[in-house]
């Protein structure tokens, strides 16, 4: 059993670490990559992108009801425990509006902005809580991959719909249908403003890996559109906040991951200017990494009480 990840959400299936031999039964190709870490515990070389991909595939097959999962070469491989944390904190947000009971089942509908080739949030949300998802994707290869994952996994077919956003610069426009409502929106935005910035961050991360990596490739992969956007995450999230004001009553909780804490005050100021009724930041920590979930709603108290979960 790998080292405990006690900083993960209490409902996270991976907070006690990984049973590598159990995962190997799901994905036998993982076996050659397993080795003892300095503590004598089964682990992998976290700088090896193939090992990371196989491990996360095994986690998805073992814990999230999948029969099949793959992504195109070079696309972003999701670190499953951290992605699961985001889903669980969304569940907590909804529970706070539902007498502290997590609403489950197909009556709950989530909008995944930028579902990606890996389709990770619909996979986890459908398995853990039975939610329905609309996943939106503008990249043609990622769109095709996400649709394939849904098509080849029985329990996703009637819970997950993948829609193509024709305009990559758009957010919800053109994909939210008339009279369509969502209990939450999730987003994992591209964080970097340039390929050079992404590579610099990757080199820093590789130096922090133990043992230090001899290979500077990104261990979780990622295409440029998944990692880079004009203006970085600051501009992307500002655009998302602005776009959310176009649909103030169609989504209960708007949320997004925020990598850099120094951007938060900019977002808070913008949210106040748009007169949202509430916003909050949830800190999430996985190992040495700290990320944040920024959430906001335009709904007034009376509207929130009438919302049907």
Image (cartoon, grey):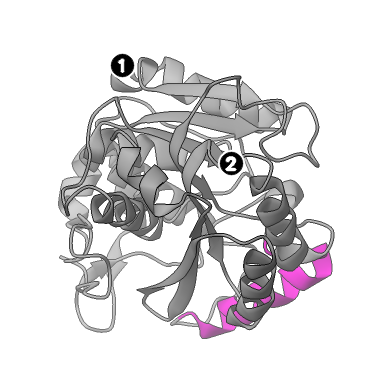
Q: Nearer the viewer, residue 214 or 203?
A: 203
Give residue 29's quadrant in the image.
top left
Report whether residue 64 is seen: no
What residue appears at the point 38 percent right and 16 percent down from the top-left corner?
Answer: 157
Residue carrying label 2: 113
The secondary element bearing badge 1 is classed as helix
Looking at the magenta stretch, what is its main secondary structure? helix
Report whether residue 132 is seen: yes
Q: Position of residue 156 (x, y in %)?
A: 35, 22
Q: Which mark is residue 154?
A: 1
In the image, taking residue 161 as reference, residue 275 lies left or right, namely right
Quadrant of the frame with the N terminus:
bottom left
Q: Which residues are magenta?
A: 191-209
The image shows residue 127, relative to residue 188, as above or below, that is above
Query: For mark 1, does the 10 Å Cα neighbourhood hold few (<14), some (14 to 19), or many (20 or more) residues?
Result: some
What residue appears at the point 42 percent right and 24 percent down from the top-left corner?
Answer: 160
Q: Nearer the viewer, residue 16 or 22?
A: 16
Query: Total label count?
Result: 2
In the image, taking residue 248 as reference, residue 2 lies left or right, namely left
């Amino acid at each position: 059993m790998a080292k405990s990840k006690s900083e993960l959400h209490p409902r996270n299936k991976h907070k006690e670490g990984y049973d590598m031999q159990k995962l190997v039964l799901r994905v036998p190709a993982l076996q050659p990559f397993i080795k003892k870490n300095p503590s004598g515990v089964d682990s992998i070389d976290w700088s090896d992108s193939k090992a990371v991909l196989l491990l996360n595939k095994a986690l998805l097959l073992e814990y999230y009801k999948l029969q099949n999962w793959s992504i195109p070469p070079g696309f972003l491989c999701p670190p499953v425990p951290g992605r699961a944390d985001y889903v669980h904190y969304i569940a907590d947000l909804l529970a706070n509006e539902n007498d502290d009971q997590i609403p489950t089942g197909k009556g709950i509908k989530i909008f995944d902005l930028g579902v990606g080739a890996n389709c990770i949030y619909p996979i986890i949300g459908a398995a853990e809580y039975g939610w329905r998802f609309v996943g939106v994707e503008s990249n043609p290869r990622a769109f095709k991959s996400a649709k394939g994952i849904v098509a080849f996994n029985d329990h996703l077919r009637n819970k997950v719909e993948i829609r193509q956003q024709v305009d990559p610069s758009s957010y919800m426009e053109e994909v939210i249908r008339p009279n369509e409502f969502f209990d939450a929106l999730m987003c994992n935005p591209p964080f970097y403003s340039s390929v050079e910035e992404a590579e610099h961050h990757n080199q820093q991360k590789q130096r922090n890996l133990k043992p230090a990596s001899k290979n500077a490739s990104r261990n979780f992969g990622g295409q440029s559109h998944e990692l880079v956007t004009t203006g970085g995450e600051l501009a992307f999230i500002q655009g998302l906040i602005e776009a959310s004001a176009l649909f103030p009553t169609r989504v209960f909780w708007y949320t997004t991951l925020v990598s850099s804490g120094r951007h938060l005050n900019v977002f808070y100021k913008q949210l106040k200017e748009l007169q949202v009724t509430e916003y909050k930041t949830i800190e999430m920590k996985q190992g040495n990494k700290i990320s944040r979930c920024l959430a906001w709603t335009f709904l007034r108290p009376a509207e929130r009480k009438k919302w049907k979960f």
